[in-house]
Image: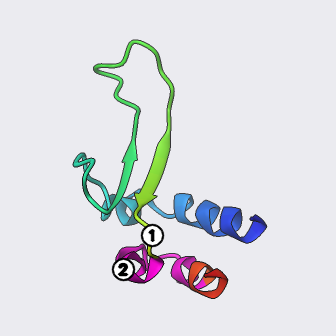
Amino acid sequence: MDEALEVSTQFFNLPSAEKMRLFSEDVHKPVRYGTSLNQARDEVYCWRDFIKHYSHPISDWIHMWPSNPSNYRYYYKRKF
């Protein structure tokens, strides 16, 4: 669990431009980065950045996961 949290932290600490490569408002995309913060529309501010990716079975999806940070895929391949 600690390694998963560490690699996730590394992802969220990447520059915005790198994370935005995965940005999509399409909730059906198998891999997407997003945020819930919209100051023009939201009445209550609850900032939540997220990365979502399909993962079962892992062999079908892992190739689509972020390649940066470089150990993002490695950790999960090693565990499963």
Indicate the position of residue 16 as horizontal and vertical percent values: 41, 57
Describe the element under mark 1 as helix, strand or loop.
loop
Q: Is residue 65 magenta?
A: yes
Residue that badge 2 annotates? 60
Identify which residue is drawn at 35% across, 23% down. 39
Residue that badge 1 annotates? 56
Q: CA distance from mark 1 to mark 2?
A: 7 Å
Indicate the position of residue 76 as horizontal and vertical percent values: 59, 78
Indicate the position of residue 78 as horizontal and vertical percent values: 64, 87
- The quarter in which the N terminus is drawn is bottom right
Please indicate whether residue 14 sits to the left or right of residue 10 in the image: left
- Segment colored magenta: 58-74
Quarter-of-image position of residue 62: bottom left
Mark 2, Cα crowd under 10 Å, few <14 / some 14-19 / many 20+, is few
Mark 1, Cα crowd under 10 Å, few <14 / some 14-19 / many 20+, is few
Q: Is residue 50 magenta?
A: no
Q: Are marks 1 and 2 in contact (CB under 8 Å)?
A: yes
Identify which residue is drawn at 45% across, 70% down. 56
Indicate the position of residue 58 as horizontal and vertical percent values: 46, 77
The kind of residue on which mark 2 rests is Asp
